[in-house]
Image (cartoon, grey):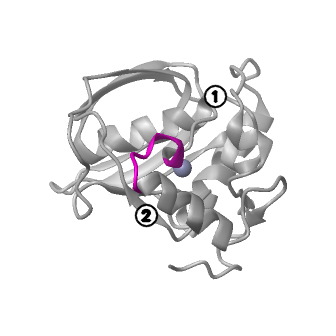
Amino acid sequence: MAVLPILITGDPVLHGRASEVTEFDQRLDTLVADMFETMAAAPGVGLAAPQVGQPLRLFVYNWTDDDGVLWRGVAINPELWISPPPTGDADVDEESEGCLSIPGERFPLRRADLAILRGVGLDRTPFEIRAEGWLARIFQHEYDHLDGILYADRLAAPHAKASLRAIRKNGWGEPGGSWMPGVDDLDA
Ligand code: ZN
């Protein structure tokens, strides 16, 4: 297994639609194992394949809820159903989100409270997870990556402007930018 460099916003792989996974082979097993290791090293609660330069429809997640339940897995060729997102302004304390491809930054964003994720695992066994709260947020965030959407693309004003300023200030927004978990210090 290996920790992989994580692409930073501006690289075309992050901003285009990823392709369905068709080959369930050793290469896919290795990619998923490397993604789990990279997510742990970052650290993060989710990581999508485009973030490590692979334009494929899969993501991994690892998050422990308030009841101490560990939610950990891989979603390959997922589908996502969400409840209507609540209206109004996002709460800075309760709804601020981050992304390993916009490292060290956080901005508040409204998300649906409920999400139903369907996909298959590495053994192609279908699964369905009914997620609420932060797990639903993680699934929405990671699923968006597969369609080339970063959470910064969904921010309401004035957070959208603030995120663009942060991206400019960090010198991001160009193709080929990346950082290495465990090597680069990108703490906010
Ligand atoms: Zn992200």
Verify whether residue 63 appears in magenta. Answer: no
Q: Among all residues in the image, which is located at the extreme right?
A: 176
The residue carrying mark 1 is 57
Can you tell which quarter of the image residue 76 is in? top right
Name the residue tied to disc 2: 106
Q: Earlier in the sequence, mark 1 or mark 2?
A: 1
Pick whichever, 177 or 81, lies toward us. Answer: 177
Looking at the picture, how far across and down is residue 3, in whole percent? 71, 63
> Measured along the vertical axis of the image, is residue 127 above or below residue 90?
above
Q: Amino acid at mark 1?
A: Arg
Q: Is residue 37 left or right of residue 95?
A: right
Is residue 154 shown in magenta?
yes
Residue 1 visible in this rendered orientation of the protein:
no
Q: SS of the residue at dot 2?
A: strand
Please name which of the two marks, 1 or 2, marks the residue nearer to the observer.
Answer: 2
Question: In the rendered image, which quarter contains the N terminus?
Answer: bottom right
- Residue beneath the point at 27% across and 33% down: 112
Vertical comparison of 178 with 21: above or below: below
